Image (cartoon, rainbow, N blue to C red):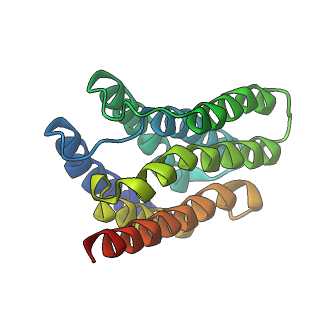
């Protein structure tokens, strides 16, 4: 059981390793996160943490909770720094869909349905960032999303109880991070050619 605590501690450490340079880059105006994505991610991540705890995720859920709190801080920074002022109708669509879906989890008594809904909402949060990364790929950090891919892989291994409720969110977010990295790499190559 001690190895799960070590994996959880590593995942929390990776959360800080990923976020600290990202936050510094935001403060230096080198990275310009999309505020809508980060509000969605912060909300859903913290609620998924609570659902994972309810389903017995144990120490493996703690990195998700830490990430939720820091993600809300990134959303705050994106808002006060006005990081991405290019808010499109599509971004509003993603934001409204995501935020309107959040109350649904409250009406489900099963943590699985909460996690399914919140995972879908979190994926909607990737919409504005994917659009932005496609058009402005140099304003996103590949290292950040690579570390989050690794972090979510460690979270899965650290979970005390493996079920769809506890694994769905970190596995889906790891996949979304990989997808976003491929878009950024591809678009950087196209724009640099």
Q: How many labels does the image show?
A: 0
Q: At 45% from the left edge and 72% from the top edge, which residue is drawn?
A: 182
Closer-to-camera residue (106/28): 28
Q: Can residue 2 be seen in this view?
A: no
Q: Where is residue 60 in the image (x, y as percent from the top left)?
A: 53, 56
Q: Where is residue 89 in the image (x, y as percent from the top left)?
A: 59, 32
Relative to 90, is 21 above or below? below
Closer-to-camera residue (24/46): 24
Q: At 43% from the left edge and 49% from the top edge, which residue is drawn?
A: 132
Q: At 50% from the left edge and 51% from the top edge, which residue is drawn?
A: 131
Instruction: Judge left or right: residue 28 versus residue 48.
Output: left
Q: Is residue 35 visible?
A: yes
Residue furthest out toward the left: 28
Q: At 58% from the left edge and 42% from the top edge, which residue is drawn?
A: 49
Residue furthest out toward the top: 80
Q: Quadrant of residue 150?
A: bottom left
Image quarter in which the C terminus is found: bottom left
């Amino acid at each position: 059981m001690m190895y799960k605590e070590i994996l959880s501690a590593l995942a929390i450490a990776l959360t800080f390793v990923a976020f600290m340079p990202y936050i510094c880059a935001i403060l230096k105006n080198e990275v310009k996160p999309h505020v809508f994505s980060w509000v969605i991610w912060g909300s859903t991540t913290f609620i998924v943490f609570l659902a994972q705890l309810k389903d017995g995720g144990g120490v493996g859920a703690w990195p998700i909770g830490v990430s939720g709190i820091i993600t809300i801080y990134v959303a705050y920074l994106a808002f006060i720094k006005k990081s991405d002022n290019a808010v499109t109708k599509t971004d509003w669509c993603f934001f409204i869909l995501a935020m309107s879906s959040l109350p649904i989890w409250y009406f489900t008594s099963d943590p699985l349905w909460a996690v399914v809904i919140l995972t879908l909402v979190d994926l909607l949060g990737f919409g504005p960032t994917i659009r932005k990364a496609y058009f402005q790929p140099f304003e996103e950090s590949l290292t950040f999303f690579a570390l989050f891919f690794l972090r979510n892989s460690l979270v899965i291994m650290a979970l005390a109880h493996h079920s769809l409720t506890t694994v769905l969110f970190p596995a889906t977010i790891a996949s979304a991070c990989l997808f976003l990295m491929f878009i950024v790499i591809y678009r950087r190559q196209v724009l640099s050619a």
